[in-house]
Image (cartoon, coloured by chain):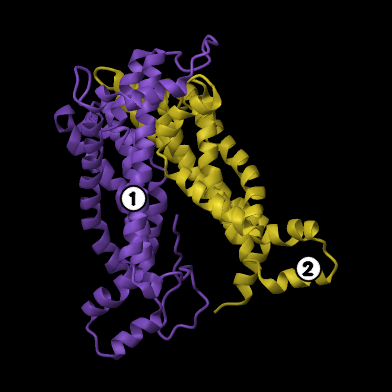
Amino acid sequence: MDQGPGRDGAPVNVFELVWAWLTDPENWQKNFRDLGIPARILEHLTYTGLAIVFAVMIAVPIGIYVGHTGRGGFLVVGVANWFRALPELGLVILLVLAMGVALALQALTIVLVALAIPPLLAGTYSGLRNVDPEVVDAARGMGMRERDIVWRVEVPIALPLMLGGLRTATLQVIATASIAAYMGLGGLGRYVIDGQRFGTLEGYTMMAGGAVLIAALAIVVELTLAGVQRLVVSPGLRNRKFSRRETRVRTKPVEKTEVAIS
Amino acid sequence: MRWIWDHIEELLATSWVHLGLALIPVLVGLLISIPLGWVAHHWRTARAILVPVSSLLYTIPSLALFVLMPLVLGTRILDPINVQAALTIYTVALLVRSVADSLDATPKDVIAAATAIGYGPTRRFFAVEFPLSVPVLVAGVRVAAVSNISLVSVGAIIGVGGLGLYLTAGAQLTPPNYAEIIAGIVLIVLLALIVDGLLVLLGRLLTPWTRARAGTVRR
C-alpha cells in the first residue's frame, strides 16, 4: 500500500510517469484491462447527467413554488444546510449494499439525485425570493396572470442564482460519481480504485492519472456551465449584484426570510 | 446496535481523529485566507487572480485532490497530511472570497470615523474592519467546517478517513456490517451538527453588537 513518490527516495519523476500514462494511446482505447478513458468519461457524464435531469425535475418546480409563494422557505434552506453534513461515501455504500449489486446503478442515481436536490432547491428558491417585489407588483398591475408572472418575470430574473445552484449541484454530483467505482460501478473513479489495488508506483501513476482526468472533467463542465449561464441570462441582468436585500421597503408584507447560498 | 456498544470507545476515539483531520485544515485555512482576503480587497489585480484561482481549486473533486496531493507535497499516499492539505485548500478557496467581500462591505462612514479619531491603517483593520467582517467569516467557516467533516470520509477510499474507515470496513465484510456503516454515517452527521452549533454560538459571542441592533431597530 505504500506507494507514491518518496518511498525509498528513488529519483523517479512521477509527473513524467503520469503524463506518459495520460498520453499513452493504449489507455484511450479499449484494452485487456479497461474500457478506455473515453468510455470512462462517458460513464461519468452519464451518471452525472441522469442524476441532474431527475434532480432538476424535482427541485426546480418545488423551488419555484416555494419561492413564489414564500411558504416553507426556512425548510428549504434548512434542508440544504443539513445535507452538506451527509457523508456521500456512506450514502453510496449503504444504498448500493441495501439495494444489491444488480441495482447498483439505480442506487447510485438515487444518492446523486438526493445530493443534487438541495443546492438546486436553494438556488431556485433564493433566486425567486430575491426578485424585487416591486417588479412582481408591476407585472401584476399590468394584468399578468400568476403563471406568466412566474415564467416571464420571476424565473428569468432568478436565472443567475438558479444556474448557480445547478453548477453547485453538478460539481457535487461529478465528485460523488467518482466514488461510485468503489462499489463496483464505472466512471473515472475506476482508475483511482484499480490503481490502488496494484499498490505499486505504476498503480499510483494510474490513480494520479485518473485524478487528473476527474479534476479536468469537473473544471471543463464548470466552465461550460459558466459559459451557458452567460448566454442565457438576460443582458439586462448582467453585472448586477445579487445579494440579500432586506432593507428595501416592501409594498407587500413579506415575512423575513433567511437566504443562505453556499 | 450491539456492535456499536461493543466498540463505543473506539468510535469515540476515532471521532476525535476525524475532528482533527477536518478542523485543523479549517483553522489553518482561516489563518491563510485572512491575509489573502485582505490582499484581494486592496489590490484589484490580486483579486483578479485570487478569486478565479480559488474557485477553480474549489471545483476539483475531493477524491482527485486527495490522490494528487502526494504529487504536489512529495508525501506518501497514506499520509493524513494529504487529506488535511486538500481540505485546507478548499477552506482557503471558500474563505478568501468571503474575507475580501466582507472587507469591501465595510461602510465608508465607519472607516472615515475610525480614521478621524486617529486610527492608523493597522489598528483600524484589527479594531474595526476585521471585527465587522466576523459574521460573514463565521458563515464561511461554518460551511467549510461542515463540508470538511463530511469530506474527510472520502479519504477512507485511499486509507485515511477517520470515521470514514468504518464505512469502508463495514462494506468489505460479507455480509456487510450495517451497524458499523450506519454508526459511521450517524457520527459524522452528529459531529457536523455539533461543530456547526458551536460555531453559531461562537459567532454570537464574538459579535454582541449584531444582537443589540436586531433588538432595537426593527424594520
Q: Quadrant of the C terminus of chain A?
A: bottom left
The type of residue carrying mark 2 is Ala
Residue B66 in percent (x, y) is at 45, 30
Q: Please name the residue that numbered disc 2 is placed on.
A: B114
Q: Quadrant of the N terminus of chain A?
A: top left
Q: Please name the residue that numbered disc 1 is placed on.
A: A169
Chain colored purple = A
Name the residue located 17 percent from the left edge and 29 percent from the top edge: A100
Q: Chain of mark 1?
A: A
Left or right placement of residue A5 versus residue A82 in this view: right
Nearest the eye: A50 or B144: A50
Mark 2, secondary structure of its residue: helix
Name the residue located 29 percent from the left edge and 37 percent from the top edge: A177
Left or right placement of residue B119 versus residue B69 in this view: right
Q: Chain of mark 2?
A: B
- The single residue placed furthest to the right in the displayed view is B118
The answer to whether any part of residue B200 appears in the image is no
Chain colored yellow = B
The answer to whether any part of residue B28 appears in the image is yes
The type of residue carrying mark 1 is Ala
CA–CA distance in space, label 1 to label 2: 43 Å
Residue B89 in percent (x, y) is at 53, 39
Residue A73 in percent (x, y) is at 37, 65
